[in-house]
Structures are given as C-alpha cells and as structure tokens.
Amino acid sequence: MDTASLDDGCLGYEVILRDDDTSTPRCPHGPTLLFEKVGKQGEEGKRFYACSACRDRKDCNFFQREDEKVSETRKLAREVENKRGRPPFSQQQYSARLHQFVSLPPDEKTFCQDCQLLLLAKETGTHAAHACIPVTATQLRQPSRLLLPLDNKKSNAQYLFTERTTRFLLGTLVAQGFNKVLCVGTPRLHELIKSEYPRGKANPIKSLLLDIDFRYAQFYGQDEFCHYNMFNHHFFDSEASSAVIQAFLRESKGEKVVMVADPPFGGLVKPLANSFSRISQAWANQQNSDRSCVDMPMIWIFPYFFEPRILGCFPSFTMLDYQVDYDNHSLYKHGKTGRKQSPVRLFTNITPAKIVLPLEEGYKFCTICERYVWSLNKHCTKCNVCPSKDGRLWKHCSVCERCVKPSWQHCQSCGRCALPDHPCDQSQGEVGCYNCASLGHKRKACPRKHVSSHGSTSKRRRIIKTKRQKEKKKKKTFN
Ligand code: SAH
Ligand code: ZN
Ligand code: ZN
Ligand code: ZN
Ligand code: ZN
C-alpha cells in the first residue's frame, strides 16, 4: 500500500511538502500548505495553498490557487491581516507581565475570563465590566484548568488528559530517565512536570511547551513556552524561539531529551511527521557527532486508525495498547470491558518492552511480542502477533490469513473480511479508505469521515451520508 499517497487523503486532499517554504504564501498561522485534490474525477491535480492549522474556513479562510497571480494590493492587505492575527503581547512581554503578576499581593491576583488574561494592577479598571476572578497560586500552576478549552473542533480541539493519563505519561518518562521533556501540544503534561519536578528540587525535570495557543505564554518564562505551529514547524517569534529550542534540545551532562506530542486529530499526518522529523533533526544537530545516527525519542499520541499512515512516515515506531483518555471528551474514555474505549494510542520509537502499562488497569505483558497489551488482546499463534488495535478481542480468518475485527465476517463475493452489511458491488481496490486508511471500506462509507474536512465539502458529505452511517454515528462505535 502506498501510504504516501494515502496520507491526508482524509481531507480528499494530499499535502505536497517542499523543503523550502520561504516563498510559500503566509496566513496568520505561518507558511500555508500546498494541497492537491485527490480521488475526485475531473478535479484531480488541482493545487492550492490553504492554512496549515485550521481545517475550517471559518477560522482561517486563506485560499490561493497555486498558479494564481496575487496583486501587490492584495499582498499588502494580507500583511495587515497576518499582523492582526498576532497575540496582543510578545513572549518577552508576557514573561515580563508574569514577573510583575507573581509579585502582586494574593488578593490582587486577578484573571479576566472574558479576555483570558492575567491582569496587572493598573489593568483591573479597564476590565471592570468583565468576569474577573481571583487566582490562587495553585491555579497559576495549572493554566489548563483556568483557561477555557478552545473547542473549535476542527482547529484547536483542546482535549485535556485525565489525571490518570497525565500521571502515566510522566511516570513512564521518569522510569526511562528522561529529564528534558519537549511538550508539543501537551500543556497538561507540561504543568504536571513543572509542579512535580520543579527547578531547585532534587532531580528536576525541564519542560518546554510548544503550542499554538498563545494564552499559555502568560503563565511561563520565555524558556518554558514557545508559540509554535506543529503543522508547518513554524515558530511565531522565530528569533527568540530558535535560541530557546536549540538550548533545550542540547543534552549536556546527564541530560536526556524526549518529545511528547498530542496533535489535534483532524488529520494531516504527513505535515506533522515532517515537523517532528525536523525537531528530531535539530536535536541530532545539537548533540556530539556520535549521536547523529540515533533518533530522538518521541511519543506521538493519535487514534489507532492512523497507524498505517504514522508507520508509513516513521517505520521504526510501534503503536502501544495504552488507551489515552481525556477529561473533556466523553468518547475518548478509558474503558474496561463494556464501557466505551478510547481509540487514542501512543506511537513511539522507545522500545515497547520498556513501557510498562498498568497491570491493575488490565494490561499484561506478551512475552512473544515483547510488549504490554490490553487484556482482551489475545496473541494469535497463526499471525504471531497480538492483533487487536481497538481494545476488542479480534478473531483469526483462515481464508484471509489474518486477524480481523470481531464485527467483521468473511465475504465470499468480495473474497475478504468486512462488516456484514458492506456494499458488495463496490470494488474496494487496493487503496482502502482515504479517511482512516482502513481496507474495509471506501471513504464514502467511512464511519469517521465527519471528523475531518477542509471546509466546503460539507454539503457533498451531507448528500452522500447513507442511512447506515447515520445509524453508526448514533451508536458512536468505531467498527
Ligand atoms: N491532551 C493534551 C492537549 C491536547 S489538545 C493535554 O492535556 O496536555 C491539542 C493541543 O495542541 C492543544 O493544546 C492545542 O492548543 C494545541 N494545538 C492545536 N493546533 C496546534 C498547532 N497547529 N500547532 C501547535 N499546537 C496546536
Ligand atoms: Zn491560517
Ligand atoms: Zn491471526
Ligand atoms: Zn476473511
Ligand atoms: Zn474509513
């Protein structure tokens, strides 16, 4: 299977990556990405630039055909627009404000909920008509609980880890001896590290948060937060940030760096992989020459159905059975049998045997696969793997000679396993689903296709939504 062409077909588009993005047009979110339409007859090959960060036109409506001539006036207008999208303060200013804020007397520490801003003494007057609340020292250390999660589903989609998952991640990193954690879109992990392993205590752990949500800048020093877009590897405050990130990636005596990323699930595997590769490259460049052939340790948190595409980009990665769960997402809950199970997993280049999954939650060690697996993941002697991806007990099909989901049955006319009510007449081809990379269905029938789109296709999607899919959506299961 050609994963490169499948990649990001979830949008009905493929992303064309180029080494040099200096001449690429920019939106407020940095260099745009070049998309090419795929799969739709007549429109194939049409290329255009669109925002890397926002999958919804409502959030960023940048659009330019690849061959379009852009007038100087429009370029200027864009410049103005890009400036308007910038944060109200620079990272340096945010750090200076924090410095002033912490020295305020406890009863004057105020947070404006309307502006999502920590207020300095002289500013409280201007926010008098807003919802302002007192801020405790604990809240100041847990901004992810103070800030309102951005829930515009397609762009920011802030899904915060449960306490269980955050502690599991931190425990895993500590057990591996990592003491520098690059938190890419993982503010909750960042704040737990800072409060559990602070500077000045024995065995501190350094943490640097890279996130597009600049509200976090007001809670951290300049060496603890960089305003960053992980879809185009863009540092918004590039001069200040490049020194910070380089110093962070450099391992001086006894230091061990690891990256933990939890990107929005909207798709775009290829650009994410590209950004993480560039981080890994920057890490290698910072080490003594003998380290250049080793890869930077990384954990990429993403749903299991992206496994083929992630492994297509990072063949050395393994998907672990651990179910990541979230406080503010009812669907993504860790489940014992019978309860809903989270489809979100860890993908990592750390040796799987070293990552001990909690036995008390029902994980066990498979001595043949040499990794911890979920209790229902039974080793198949014919496939010689623990085959389950979704937490359910999979079964072996002797005709297909592989293990399949419990809900699938072998279909004589298609010559393969599929859901019992799959449309037999549709040739499935070799490519599989452009949305989730499953070989079991085409994109049209994908139970998950409502998850991603690049704006304008919604009408078409409504039309082709079949009764079966509607039923599926109601059940909210991942078949
Ligand atoms: N589970 C994590 C949060 C994951 S939600 C935790 O609890 O710490 C996704 C995170 O990525 C959010 O913090 C969001 O602000 C950030 N994010 C979204 N789009 C981004 C982008 N294009 N670049 C960098 N960060 C982004
Ligand atoms: Zn944009
Ligand atoms: Zn099998
Ligand atoms: Zn079969
Ligand atoms: Zn699908």
Image (tube, rainbow, N blue to C red):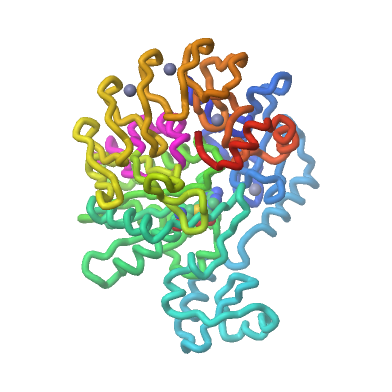
Q: Is residue 291 magenta?
A: yes
Q: Quadrant of ligand 4?
A: top left
Quick one: 474 or 107, which is closer to the camera?
474
Q: Quadrant of residue 137?
A: bottom left
Q: Quadrant of residue 215?
A: bottom right
Residue 301 visible from this viewpoint: no
Q: Residue at x 69, y 26 (%)?
A: 46
Q: Residue at x 69, y 59 (%)?
A: 84
Q: Is residue 247 left or right of residue 23?
A: left
Give coordinates of residue 118: x percent, y percent.
Answer: 55, 75
Q: Which residues are magenta?
A: 290-319
Relative to 223, is 349 above or below?
above
Q: Quadrant of residue 68?
A: top right
Quick one: 116 or 250, which is closer to the camera?
116
Count of picture labels = 0
Give coordinates of residue 289: x percent, y percent.
Answer: 26, 40
Q: Is residue 262 left or right of residue 215?
A: left
Relative to 277, is 86 above or below?
below
Q: Is residue 165 magenta?
A: no
Give coordinates of residue 267: x percent, y percent.
Answer: 54, 39
Give coordinates of residue 329: x percent, y percent.
Answer: 52, 54
Q: Residue at x 33, y 38 (%)?
A: 376
Residue 130 visible from this viewpoint: yes
